Image: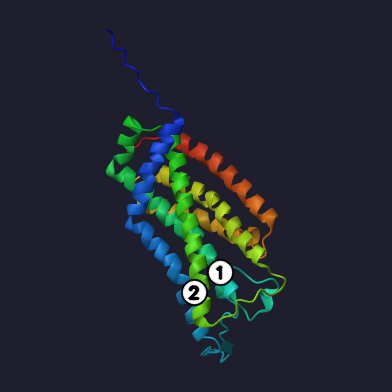
Amino acid sequence: MEKTVKFEHNSSGKRIKSMLKVDFRRMFKSRLFYILIACSLLIPIVMTVMMTMMDGSVSVDPQTGKETVMQGPENTWQSIGTLPGGEAMGGMDVMSMCNINMAFMGIAVFVCLFISDEFRSGYAKNLFTVRVKKSDYVISKTLSGFICGALMLLAYLIGALLGGAVSGLSFELVGGLTAANIVMCILAKIFLMPVFVSVFTLISVAAKQKTWLAVCGSLGGGMLLFMTVSMITPLASTAINVLLCLGGGLLFAFGLGAISNIVLRKSSLV
C-alpha cells in the first residue's frame, strides 16, 4: 500500500500569523515594552503634579527684571489636549506640547530597537531564509508597533486621569466638550498611530543594524508630523476626525509598507 506525502501549502495568512506570534511573544517578554508603558503611565502623573505645585510661582529675568508667573493646569483634560477655547487659559504652552501626543515619538524608540536588534543579531537574515517573506515581516512589525503604540496611548490616558485626581484638578467638561468627544479623540489618536509606525518601520529597515541612525532618522521624521497631531486629533474630536485618521493610517500603512518591502528586497540584509 503506497503512502503519499503531502506538503502543506504555507499561505501568506499562515506566515503572517506565525510571524505575529513570534513578534508578540518577543514584545510581551521585552523589558523595553514594559519600560515604555510604565513611562507612558508615570509621565502625565509627574508632570501634572509638578506643574500644579509650581502654579503661581514667580521667576524674574535677571537682565530685564521682568517677572513671569508660572500657571499650572486647571483641568485634567489638558493632559490630553487643549480645551475648546483654551488658548486663553493662562498660557498653557508646556501642557499643549507635552501631552499625550508624546506617545507618538515614544513608539519610535520601540520600533527602532525592536527591528535593529534583529538585524544586528542576524535573526532577520535567518528569518527571511527559512520562515517568512519580507512583506510578511513588514506587516508583522507594523501591527506589533501599532499595538504597542495603542497601549502607550491608553496608559497615558490612565496616567492623566490619575494625575488629575492626585492634583485635585477639575474633571469638568467645559467649552461644549462631551465625553463622546474625548472618546473620539483617543480613538482618532489610536487610528493615527499606523502613520507614525509605518514611517519608523521604513526608516528602521533602511538603517538595519545601525540603531543610532534608525533612532535619529525616526525622531527627525516624526517631528515633521508631530505638529499636525493636535490639529488632526483635537480634544473636541468627532466621528469625522476618527474616519480621517483611520483612512490616513491605512493608506500610510499600505503605502509605506510597500516601500519598506522594496527596500528589504533591493538592499543587503547585513
Residue found at x 51% / y 61%:
153
Camera-side residue: 91 or 212? 91
Task: Label 2, secondary structure: give it.
Answer: helix
Other-residue count near label 1 (Cα within 10 Å), few / some / many at <14 / 14–19 / ≥20: some
Q: Count how many numbered circles sit on residues in the image.
A: 2
Quadrant of the frame with the N terminus: top left
Camera-side residue: 74 or 105? 74
Residue identified by numbered label 1? 97
Identify which amino acid the numbered label 1 is placed on: Met
Task: Give the image location of residue 160, x and y in percent.
Answer: 51, 71
**Which coloring applies here?**
rainbow
Residue identified by numbered label 2? 162
Residue found at x 51% / y 40%:
257
Q: Quadrant of residue 86?
A: bottom right
Residue with the most extreme bottom position: 65
Q: Quadrant of residue 46?
A: bottom left
Task: Label 1, secondary structure: give it.
Answer: helix
Give the distance between the C-alpha atoms of the residues marked 1 and 2, in whole angstroms: 20 Å
Task: Give the image location of residue 145, x and y in percent.
Answer: 45, 50
Image position of 71 (left or right of 205): right
Other-residue count near label 2 (Cα within 10 Å), few / some / many at <14 / 14–19 / ≥20: some
Residue found at x 63% / y 81%:
90
Asked whether the viewer can see residue 109, the reply is yes
Task: Give the image location of residue 112, x and y in percent.
Answer: 40, 51
Q: Who comes first in sequence, dot 1 or dot 2?
A: 1
Task: Give the image location of residue 28, x and y in percent.
Answer: 36, 53
Identify which amino acid the numbered label 2 is placed on: Leu
Quadrant of the frame with the C terminus: top left
